[in-house]
């Protein structure tokens, strides 16, 4: 399959590139710079090459034969949410979707499927509710409004089928949230954050890339798809699992007020949560390699 990956040089994109290459797929990783080397399968079965946005805007014709789009592009949310950061987070997602749509239209491309990154923040925060793809969404806070605008912007990208993967917290080595989440434990100061009762909807990076490929190849999957483990964890469960995997103590509470003062509005990501379930993925036959938090962290930290 000929695939365009936007955001393919990032944490998730690099892992996806390797998985798709090993499966014999090939295509383009669209990036601001071609200095980042493209991934190539060790067995030569398939490969992706980096192509700059500027070059495609000059001549998008090489995208004419694209069969699938994976859009992962967007400014990281793990930063203090100043007004300028909020603007970058929102506009980077909307502008990338608009660029992709315009380029594919100029190339007269007719892709079969779009797999669009999104977020479980669409459902808002809750201590007690469980959310599936049938649950109502909200725009009552910053991130839920970003997800709303992101999914709306994805409609500009032409595709016969659209799969909107709403990511939970992606756990993997070499990027994402996990390295920062583990810092207190590595410093022998791990413990619950706030009450420790808030839910974490998470997914192992290996399962996420497998689910993206599953969505590309499964014609029955469309619309919102929750990209999360079937076993969400309380913050306290995550902390105890991390401490056990690292062989570190679990004892020091991180109070809510200092986190709010240090991180501002972004502290919501740590102090609030939601219990999100992957009903659509399971109903489509997808099986998770890491459904539970302890084996997932043991795998990543061993």
Image (spheres, rainbow, N blue to C red):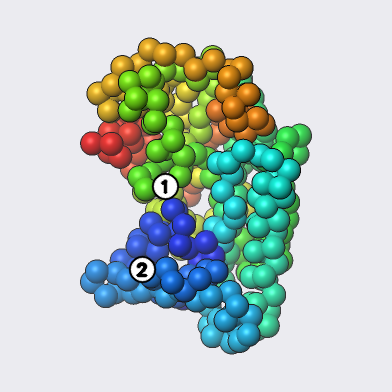
Q: Which residue is mark 2?
A: 39
For this rendering, which residue is in front, 134 or 73?
73
Residue 158 image offset from top left, x and y in percent: 66, 71
Q: Which residue is mark 1?
A: 175
Residue 181 image offset from top left, x and y in percent: 43, 32
Residue 113 image offset from top left, x and y in percent: 56, 67
Number of residues whose C-alpha sits closer than 10 Å to that of mark 1, classed few (under 14), some (14–19) or many (20 or more): few
The image shows residue 80, relative to residue 150, as above or below, that is above
For this rendering, which residue is in front, 10 or 273?
10
Q: CA distance from mark 2 to mark 1?
A: 17 Å
- Looking at marks 2 and 1 on the same chain, the residue that comes earlier in the sequence is marked by 2
Mark 2 or 1: the one toward you: 1
Instruction: Tell me what residue is drawn at x 35 percent, y 61 percent.
Output: 19
- Left or right placement of residue 230 versus residue 226 in this view: left
* Residue 109 quadrant: bottom right
Looking at the rendered structure, the secondary structure element under dot 1 is: loop
């Amino acid at each position: 399959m000929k695939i365009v990956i936007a955001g393919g040089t990032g944490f998730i994109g690099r892992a996806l590139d390797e998985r798709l290459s090993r499966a014999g797929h090939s295509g383009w990783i669209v990036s601001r710079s071609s200095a980042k080397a493209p991934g190539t399968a060790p067995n030569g079965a398939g490969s992706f090459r980096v192509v700059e946005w500027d070059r495609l805007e000059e001549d998008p014709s090489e995208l004419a034969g694209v069969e699938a789009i994976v859009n992962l592009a967007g400014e990281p949310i793990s930063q203090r949410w100043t007004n300028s950061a909020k603007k970058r987070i929102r506009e980077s997602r909307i502008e990338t979707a608009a660029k992709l749509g315009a380029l594919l239209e100029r190339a007269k491309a007719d892709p079969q499927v779009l797999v669009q990154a999104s977020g479980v923040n669409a459902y808002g925060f809750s201590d007690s509710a469980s959310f599936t793809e049938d649950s109502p969404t909200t725009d009552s806070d910053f991130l839920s409004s970003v997800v709303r605008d992101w999914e709306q912007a994805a409609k500009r990208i032409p595709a016969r089928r659209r799969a909107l993967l709403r990511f939970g917290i992606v756990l993997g080595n070499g990027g994402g949230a996990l390295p920062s989440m583990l810092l207190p434990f590595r410093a022998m100061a791990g413990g619950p954050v706030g009450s420790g009762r808030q839910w974490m909807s998470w997914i192992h990076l290996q399962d996420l890339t497998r689910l993206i490929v599953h969505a590309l190849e499964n014609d029955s999957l469309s619309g919102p798809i929750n990209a999360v483990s079937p076993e969400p964890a309380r913050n306290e469960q995550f902390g105890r699992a991390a401490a056990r995997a690292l062989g570190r103590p679990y004892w020091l509470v991180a109070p809510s007020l200092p986190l709010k003062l240090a991180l501002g509005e972004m502290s919501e990501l740590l102090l609030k949560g939601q219990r999100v379930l992957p009903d659509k993925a399971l109903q489509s036959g997808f099986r998770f390699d890491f459904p539970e938090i302890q084996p997932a962290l043991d795998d990543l930290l061993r």
